[in-house]
Image (spheres, rainbow, N blue to C red):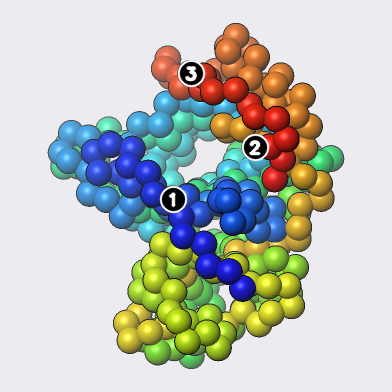
Amino acid sequence: MQVITPHPSDLGDGFIVHRALPSAARRAVGPFVFLDQFGPVQLAPGKGLDVRPHPHIGLATVSYLFEGTILHRDSLGSVVPIRPGEVNWMTAGRGIVHSERSPDELRADGPRLWGLQFWVALPRELEQCAPAFAHHGADAIPHVVREGARARVVLGEAFDAVSPVALTSPMFLVDVRLEAGAAIELEADYAERAAYVLEGEVRANDDNAATAKEHLIVFDAGETARLTAGSEPAHVVFLGGSPLDAPRFLWWNFVSSERDLILQAQAAWTEQRFPKVPGETEFIPLPARPMPPGSAL
């Protein structure tokens, strides 16, 4: 078992992002190659989240909120607000562009935001598939009750419940809230498993040391995955799945098993050959930094 301390970044206006994956200690857990926690934050009146249009290839993004609303727009023409408990699954495949912004009607008072974003590496045979977008309401996500615990099976199968989200490879994501002193053991047989602590602190298995919020616990293969909350309630997410089917290159917003596909995507974005997001005129420029050699996950 290992515990990973995410690298926090201040994006301005008090908007802090904690990146647990990829890290120097762990590049991926199952097909999950990226995990960001943003917030919780109360933005100032008149402010809002404004992630301008940017491209992706070779992955699926999963957005999951605990507080606030984000308006998703993409180059397929999707315009969908995501709210707490809902799931956005966006398949980039050979290329998609999207933006993420606070809705105009929430900016006057300053919106609250708190949530997670994941990137899932697509299997090699799907890396160049057609882009797609799917949204699932909070009521569609199954709830599970255990002694001292409430869970929502966001992706995959766990605790005898199955999420309605169509997946590209075996994986799971479960949102768990534990009462003080309560324990829960992951009832899911996946090769790679982890738990990200959002609130409170937990002890993993028989470890006497508690793991605080904003840390990622990665379980060893075959190891029991049991968490016990401390003297206060705890909030965690379990995640994992089958290992990657091949090494992946990850550069900026691009993920691929083939380095050349990332280089092609760089050129396409520089030349603005990706499809446009209807109603958007801004975009995030390609970073100036070069793609380092040998940067496969």
Q: Is residue 205 visible?
A: yes
| Marks 2 and 1, the one that precedes in the sequence | 1
Residue 34, placed above or below residue 85: above
Cα distance in 3D space between marks 3 and 2: 17 Å
Query: Is residue 103 left or right of 82 when viewed as pictured?
Result: left
Name the kind of residue labelled 1 in the image: His
- Foreground: 209 or 21? 209
Numbered disc 3: secondary structure: loop
Residue at horizontal 44%, vertical 74%? Answer: 211
| Residue 20 x %, y % | 51, 54
Query: Is residue 130 left or right of 283 when viewed as pictured?
Result: right
Residue 153 found in image quarter:
bottom right
| Residue 61 x %, y % | 58, 44
Name the kind of residue labelled 2 in the image: Leu
The residue carrying mark 2 is: 250
The residue carrying mark 1 is: 7
